Image (spheres, rainbow, N blue to C red):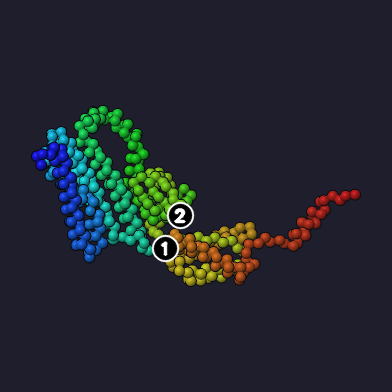
Amino acid sequence: MAWLPNWVTSLLLIVGAIGIGLTAHRALYNLLTRMVADRDLFWRSLVSRTERPARFAIVVAALALAVSIVPLTDLQASVLRHVLLICFIALIAWMVKSATHIWTTVYLRRFKLDAEDNLLARKHVTQSRIIGRIIDLLIIVIAVAAALMTFDAVRQYGVSLLASAGVAGVVVGLALQPVLKNLFAGIQLAITQPIRIDDALLVEGEWGNVEEITSTYVVVKIWDWRRLILPLSYFIENPFQNWTRESASLIGTVMIYLDYSVPIAVLRSKVEEILAASKLWDRRVANVAVTDFKENVMEIRILVSATNSGRTFDLRCEVREKLIDFVQHEYPQALPQVRLNPRNAATRRSATSTSVPREN
């Protein structure tokens, strides 16, 4: 190709190297795909997940080989080597990120969030997702910083910043305060775990389940399918209720107000009968107690338990419906009512009539 200009020869060699690299990658991954077709999900996912980083790595290697043989000027070779160095940094970051994702996926395969008792699963899933997102953020920051430091101007600027580290530290600290605040809050949440994935929370006056925990915010799916978005730091600095902190099981309360004439023993037996026939009750807590006397009624508290917050709510509704139906049919006189003593009513009417002056 002596008759071609050097830049055309260089371009053809570079394009040819890229084409050879892509062809070699396709042949290699076609072979790997056939090899793992009959194996379990882990190996199929591993091949699928590493396909794009491997393609990028093969292309970078082919370009590095082409640079050593193409007829380039010193400036052109220097620029191309600089680009390849940045690509190599990006490749390392990509590989580390993919390795982290694969390890997390393999680790979490042992836990099932859809299990009846998923407390341990929620604990490990929450830790893995928060730490994974923090690691991804750190990988990106370090990779970008390393790529920028390959430029002489940026490197000199970094040295000058180090020379005035006091002022620069204050400025950067103020600028990154929200980011750093949520970053450290994420680390605290991963370690202490005041909340976990699928936890039932009462926060900002709303009840819902933790749907997602990112590196900066938490998504709470409210019972009516709305989403409440809160920063990570909120759960470190503000009080909230976690209904599933140690166990998914909950005790629900049913309050009913009845006349003093209702027989408590019969009412207790009916509640036990309702719970025994219910598929929602977990057979752990069933209690009926008179907790207060009002002017016209007595306050009766019924405690029931279920395996999670949703089933507890449904069980409370079921007990209310069946208990009030029982009272209406068997003891209608026990429903709240206002008593009026006829003798006292006659006395009040007589007093009222004598106090009103008659017209002449």
Between 167 and 157, the one lying in front of the other is 157
Q: Quadrant of the N terminus?
A: top left
Give the answer, above or below, for where 163 lies relative to 9: above
Q: Are marks 2 and 1 in contact (CB under 8 Å)?
A: no
Give the answer, above or below, for where 161 lies relative to 311: above
Seen at 51% across and 71% down, the residue is 273
Identified by mark 2, the residue type is Trp
Seen at 59% across and 61% down, the residue is 257
Q: Is residue 149 left or right of residue 270?
A: left
Identified by mark 1, the residue type is Thr
Identify the secondary structure beneath mark 1.
loop
Badge 2: residue crowd in 10 Å (few <14, some 14–19, many ≥20): few
Q: Is residue 232 left or right of residue 16?
A: right
Between 31 and 339, the one lying in front of the other is 31
Give the answer, above or below, for where 182 lies relative to 160: below
> Can residue 162 be seen by looking at this rendering?
no
Residue 307: which numbered mark, if any? 1
Q: Residue furthest right?
A: 360
Q: Position of residue 264 (x, y in %)?
A: 57, 67
Q: Nearer the viewer, mark 2 or mark 1?
A: 2
Seen at 61% across and 68% down, the residue is 328
- Tag 2 residue: 225
Identify the secondary structure beneath mark 2.
loop
